Image: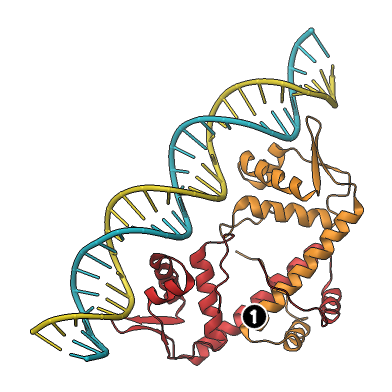
Chain colours: A orange, B red, C yellow, D cyan
Amino acid sequence: MAWNLNSERPIYSQLMERITFDIISGIYPPGSQLPSVRALAQDAGVNPNTMQKAMAELERTGLIYSQRTSGRFITEDLGMIDKTKKELASEEIKEFLKKMERIGFSRETTLKLIENMKDTKEEGES
Amino acid sequence: MAWNLNSERPIYSQLMERITFDIISGIYPPGSQLPSVRALAQDAGVNPNTMQKAMAELERTGLIYSQRTSGRFITEDLGMIDKTKKELASEEIKEFLKKMERIGFSRETTLKLIENMKDTKEEGES
DNA sequence: ATTATTGTATTAAGTAAATAGTACAATAAT
DNA sequence: ATTATTGTACTATTTACTTAATACAATAAT
């Protein structure tokens, strides 16, 4: 899957988000091994240093851990993954609603807008 | 109102977003005059150059225009403002739903999550 | 006429992010 | 034992963003 990186935010931050989403959505199952920093960097088309930074930051969250020479792995802590998933979803919803209210749409109106969007198909982004 | 700037994105970009939201939400009415670059910069606590850059970029969108020495004004084109409002809302919704699906929540589940959140109050952000 | 305010331009300096290139220790694979 | 792969560390360079400090022309205000 394409990494879809842009220059609007630090790349390492986008890499962190991408990996996090892949973990909580199950693409990287608990306990499974991640590709090496170099392999991930090549796949994403970024410098290994940048990927390394993203990994180092991700470790601070506890979602992944590294074993000196065997590689890097997803946490086996299902509770942590589920907690992260719920927190991330909650945060996304709050920020979304805040933005919509800022634009001028109440929560009720926003809900209706989403419902009336069920026919709209997504197009690719730049 | 506080500007709530952070270091996660370029400041000039956050300034653009802030002004845009203030325009489409009616805080800055069509045709009204904006404070001067220097005044806005001081209010936001940023360098005048940074605010100037945000303004220059905003002009390219057509939402505001400048008159050499009298100041800067919001467009009188109500259609453009409304179009921007609709486009922005649509974009926000699409990105939000995409993120939620990425996390693992369908559109239907997402709608339920929002509805079940009506009791949750917002707290201030860092 | 004079003054103040407007947008705008310029140069310099500092910082963070990203890339490039290289290197090393530990260990899994052979 | 040897080799390849792993995470990790380091220096140097480039680029984008931000701030700082001025400066100027046009014009609104006085």
In the image, residue B54 above or below residue C11:
below
Confirm whether residue A93 shows in the render: yes
Residue B114 is drawn in which quadrant?
Answer: bottom right
Q: Residues within 10 Å of mark 1 (few under 14, many from 20)?
A: some
Q: Chain of mark 1?
A: B
Q: Amino acid at mark 1?
A: Ala
Q: Secondary structure at mark 1?
A: helix
Q: Compared to A122, does A113 lie above or below?
A: below
User: Looking at the image, how many numbered discs can be counted on the residues?
Assistant: 1
Which image quarter is the N terminus of chain B in? bottom right
Residue A1 in view (yes/no): no
Residue, disc 1: B89
Please state which of residues A26 and D17 is positioned toward the viewer in this rendering.
D17
Would residue B116 be found to the left or right of residue D16 on screen? right
Q: Residue at x 63, y 55 (%)?
A: A5
Where is residue D25 drawn, in percent x and y? 18, 74
Tell me what residue is drawn at x 64 percent, y 39 percent.
Answer: A48
Q: Is residue B58 above or below residue A6?
A: below
What residue appears at the point 69 percent right and 70 percent down from the top-left corner?
A: B95
Q: Position of residue A29 (x, y in %)?
A: 88, 49
State which quadrant residue A6 falls in: bottom right
Where residue B9 sits: x, y (%)?
56, 61
Residue C23, given in percent of the width and then of the height, sits at 60, 22
Q: Quadrant of the C terminus of chain B?
A: bottom right
Q: Nearer the viewer, residue A16 or C29?
A: A16
Residue sitting nearer the eye, B101 or A56? A56
